Amino acid sequence: MNIDIRDLHFTYPGNVHALNGISLSIASGEQVAIIGQNGAGKTTLVKHLNGLLLPTSGVVRIGSWDTREHPVAKLAARVGYVFQNPDEQLFTKTVHDEVAFGPKNLGYPPEKVEQLVEDALELTELQDKRDVNPYDLSATWRKMVALASIVSMDTPIIVLDEPTTGQDAANIARIAHVVATLRARGKTVITITHDIDFCAENFDRIIALAQGRILLDGPANDVLGQEDVLAQTYVEPPQLTRLGLRLGFEEVVRNEEEFLAAYRRYIDDHGE
């Protein structure tokens, strides 16, 4: 399911202009990271995808639907949104009930609901916590419950708001595994993040925002290679990307595998 945004403007009360003419398209199955400093408009932008915010002017279409013409409850069948703070979306007494709430409200039959719940619990490694109250879990595991509750809705588009904030290395690896699995299933996954390493390792396209406008938009390697432009958003490329640039690699690298391959080619070319 494609996303199409045309000349999107949004102004908060008090005449605060958060988005200033955003136009972009995201194809079905793309993995997109949106980066930029606080106040750049990242969260404001993604909240337009499921109708939590509506354009001051411009158009946002999810598939053929104009978000101004459909309520949030209906858009929830197309766009799942995992909030940065899981406590903002958890409210039931057990993990199982939390993960089942979404698909039940989308009207799936009971057997389909249970199938989706079991899949989401397995994917997020929550099988042994199904009967636990989410608020008896650590913040790390509550994050996974929130993620599972959206995965279980089986929406074609999933938005992750700062998924790695406050997470340890083990849970970041779990989240990366979920992203990879969703990619394999053909889902569109969009994240807004300050974690540039997570972004570089897991997302193919990067959109950099500044002052409510698109500063850069393209393949991850191309965007991460524009160090001077990224500096305007107060974002530094990953350490390996910066090291490759300093060493004079011909191509931009964004992870360890690409760095080692580029280094071998560099040695072969320079005979060192």
Image (cartoon, helix red, strand yellow):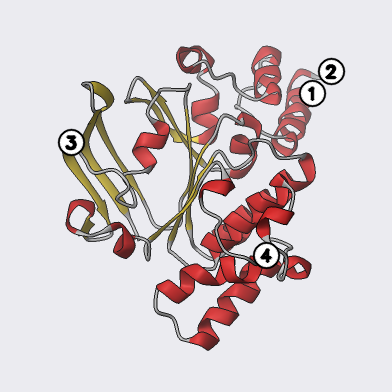
Q: Which label's residue is closer to the chain start, 1 or 4?
A: 4
- Residue 153: in sight, yes or no? no
> Are the residues flagged by discs 4 and 2 in contact, CB closer than 8 Å?
no
Q: Residue at x 52, y 15 (%)?
A: 234
* Amino acid of disc 2: Glu
Q: Which label's residue is closer to the chain start, 4 or 3?
A: 3
Q: Dot 4 corresponds to which residue?
A: 123
Q: In this rendering, would 32 be left or right of 119? A: left
Q: Which residue is drawn at 58% across and 67% down?
A: 99
Q: Which of 9 and 232 is in front in this view?
A: 9
Q: In this rendering, would 82 be left or right of 165? A: left
* Amino acid of disc 3: Thr
- The quadrant in which residue 144 appears is bottom right
- The quadrant in which residue 208 appears is top left
The image shows residue 158 at horizontal and vertical percentages of 47, 55
* Amino acid of disc 1: Ile
Distance, label 2 to label 3, CA atoms, is 58 Å
Please tell me whether mark 3 or mark 1 is closer to you in this view.
3
Please tell me whether mark 4 or mark 2 is closer to you in this view.
4
Distance, label 4 to label 2, CA atoms, is 45 Å
Please tell me whether mark 4 or mark 3 is closer to you in this view.
3
Q: Dot 3 corresponds to which residue?
A: 56
Q: Which label's residue is closer to the chain start, 3 or 1?
A: 3
Q: Which label's residue is closer to the chain start, 2 or 3?
A: 3
